[in-house]
């Protein structure tokens, strides 16, 4: 089972990710959701994940500055950036 930490504060966007994963093989994934950078950092201290899906628009962090704390908290866990923005920077 792949353990996913979904960092997304918007319930509708989180639901969209759940639905996309469910289309594949729902039994393959265990998704835990965090709604803020603070929450994801607390979860990474006490739990183990295979991948972090990180939204860059969070209530306590916006943009690329959210990436470094997550990478520092779990340096061996891949981080995939989720963004609805069409801007590459």
Image (cartoon, grey):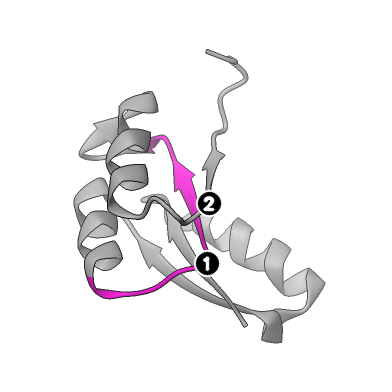
Within 10 Å of disc 1 (Cα), the crowding (few <14, some 14-19, many 20+) is some
Relative to 75, is 83 above or below?
above
Relative to 32, is 78 above or below?
above
Residue at position x 19%, y 51% from top?
38
Q: Are marks 2 and 1 in contact (CB under 8 Å)?
A: yes
Residue at position x 61%, y 58% from top?
17
Number of numbered callouts drawn: 2
Please state if 57 lies on the left or on the right of 69 as rendered: right
Residue at position x 71%, y 62% from top?
20
Q: Nearer the viewer, residue 69 or 21?
A: 69
Sequence-earlier tag: 2 or 1: 1
How far across and down, in percent of the image, does residue 30 sit?
A: 54, 79
Please state, as top left, top right, bottom left or bottom right, where the N terminus lies in the image.
bottom right
Please state if 66 lies on the left or on the right of 25 as rendered: left
Label 2: state its secondary structure: loop
Residue 59 lies within the magenta run:
no
How far across and down, in percent of the image, does residue 5 sit?
A: 45, 63
Within 10 Å of disc 2 (Cα), the crowding (few <14, some 14-19, many 20+) is some
| Numbered range of the magenta stretch | 46-57
Q: CA distance from mark 2 to mark 1?
A: 7 Å
Label 1: state its secondary structure: loop
- Label placed on residue 17: none
Residue 60: image quadrant is: top left
Residue beneath disc 2: 78
Residue at position x 27%, y 41% from top?
69
Residue beneath disc 1: 50
């Amino acid at each position: 089972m792949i353990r996913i930490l979904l960092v997304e504060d918007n319930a509708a966007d989180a639901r969209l990710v759940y639905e996309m994963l469910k289309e594949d093989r729902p039994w393959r994934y265990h998704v835990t959701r965090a709604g803020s950078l603070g929450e994801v950092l607390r979860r990474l201290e006490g739990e183990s994940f295979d991948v972090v899906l990180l939204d860059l628009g969070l209530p306590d962090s916006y943009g690329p500055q959210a990436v470094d704390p997550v990478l520092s908290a779990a340096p061996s866990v891949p981080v995939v950036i989720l963004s609805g923005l069409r801007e590459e920077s």
